[in-house]
Amino acid sequence: MSVANTDVTLDLEPCGQPDHEDCGLRDVLDRLGERWTVMAIAELARGPRRFRQLERALPGISQRMMTLTVRRLERDGMVSRLVEPTVPPSVTYELTPLGREFAEMVISLVDWSRRHKSQIALARADFDAG
Amino acid sequence: MSVANTDVTLDLEPCGQPDHEDCGLRDVLDRLGERWTVMAIAELARGPRRFRQLERALPGISQRMMTLTVRRLERDGMVSRLVEPTVPPSVTYELTPLGREFAEMVISLVDWSRRHKSQIALARADFDAG
DNA sequence: CCGCATCCGGGATGATACTG
DNA sequence: CAGTATCATCCCGGATGCGG
C-alpha cells in the first residue's frame, strides 16, 4: 500500500479492477474541468447568491454558461435552487452540505493556486526559455 | 501562435479586467481540467515513475496525451524529468516539492470523489427523474 | 522505450436573439 | 431578473505513423 517515498498515498483501485479510472470517478472530477465550476463554487461558499449576483462575480461568463454551471451543480446535489415567484423572478442558489464539503477542498486549491501562480509562471518562463 | 500540437504552451487570453486578480489563476486551475493530469499526479504521488509505467497506470491514455500531460506538468515546475541515455532510453518522472504540495490537495479531491461518487450518482438520478 | 507530427471529430464554450 | 434556443467556434484529445 504505502509504496510512496512521499507519505501521501492513495489507493486508486477501489473496484478491484486495474481499470481504476472508470469507477465513476471521472464523472466527479470532470466538474473540475468545466470552465466556471470551480470559481462558482468558491463564490457560493461565501454565501447564498442570486443568479445575477453570481454572474457578476464571474467576469466573462455568458448567461448560457452561468445557467449550465449552476444546473449541473444542482444535478450533482452540490447546490440547491430556491425560486421565489415574484415579479421579476428571484432565484437563489446555495451550497448543500455535500457542496460545502466539496467547496472546502476546492477553496484550498484556489487559495494554493493564488499563492503559487507567480512561482508557476516563473517555472513556465524558465521552461520556455531553456 | 504555436502550431505544433505537441507544443505545451497554452497561452490563454490575458484577462482584460485589471481589477480581477484571478486572471493567472485560471492558468493553474485549467490543469485540473485536463483529462489525465489529476490521475497522473495521483500516480506520481506514490513515487517516481518511468514513462511506460505511468502510461500503464492510466488505462486508456494515448502516448501523445501521456507526453503532453507530463510535459505540461514539467513546464509548471510540478514534475522533474530525468533522462538516462541508455539504450533503449529511460526517462523517469518525479514530483517536485511544488508538485507534492499540489498533489496533496489533488489527492484529497480524488479521495473525496471516490467516497461520494455513489451519493452524487444518486443525486443525478433523482434530478433526472423529477 | 520514449517522443514527435499530422489529420480530424466531438464536446465544451461563446454570441446573439428571444421569452415570461 | 432568470432563463431558452440556435448557430458558430475553438481546442482537447484520439488514431495512426515515423524516428532516435
Image (cartoon, coloured by chain):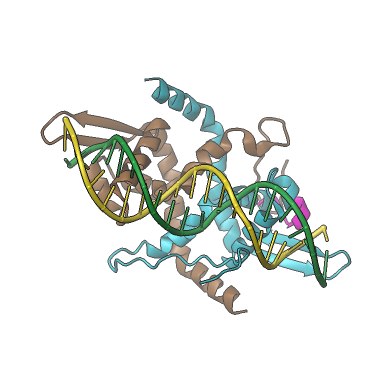
Chain colours: A brown, B cyan, C yellow, D green
- Classify the position of the C terminus of chain A by image quarter: bottom right
What segment carries the magenta color? B45-53
Q: Is residue B56 magenta?
A: no
Q: In the rendered view, tell whether residue A127 sits above or below residue B129.
A: below
Residue extending furthest toward the left: A87
Q: Would residue A107 be found to the left or right of residue A52 on screen?
A: right
Counting from the top left corner in percent of width and height, residue C10 is at: 54, 43
Q: Is residue B49 magenta?
A: yes
Q: Residue at x 57, y 37 (%)?
A: A25
Counting from the top left corner in percent of width and height, residue B119 is at: 49, 27
Residue A101 picture quarter: top left
Q: Would residue B102 be found to the left or right of residue B93 on screen?
A: left
Q: Would residue B73 be found to the left or right of residue A53 on screen?
A: right
Counting from the top left corner in percent of width and height, residue A46 is at: 30, 46
Residue extending furthest toward the top: B129
Counting from the top left corner in percent of width and height, residue B61 is at: 68, 48
Residue extending furthest toward the right: B87
Q: Residue at x 67, y 30 (%)?
A: A15
Q: Residue at x 25, y 30 (%)?
A: A82
Front position in the image: A114 or D15: D15
Front position in the image: A115 or B23: B23
Front position in the image: B1 or B68: B1
Residue A45 seen anywhere in this rendered image of the structure: no
Q: What number of labels is visible? A: 0
Residue A66 picture quarter: top left
Residue B18 seen anywhere in this rendered image of the structure: yes
Front position in the image: A6 or D16: D16
Q: Residue at x 24, y 42 (%)?
A: A51
- Classify the position of the N terminus of chain A by image quarter: top right
Q: In the rendered view, tell whether residue A98 sits above or below residue A107.
A: above
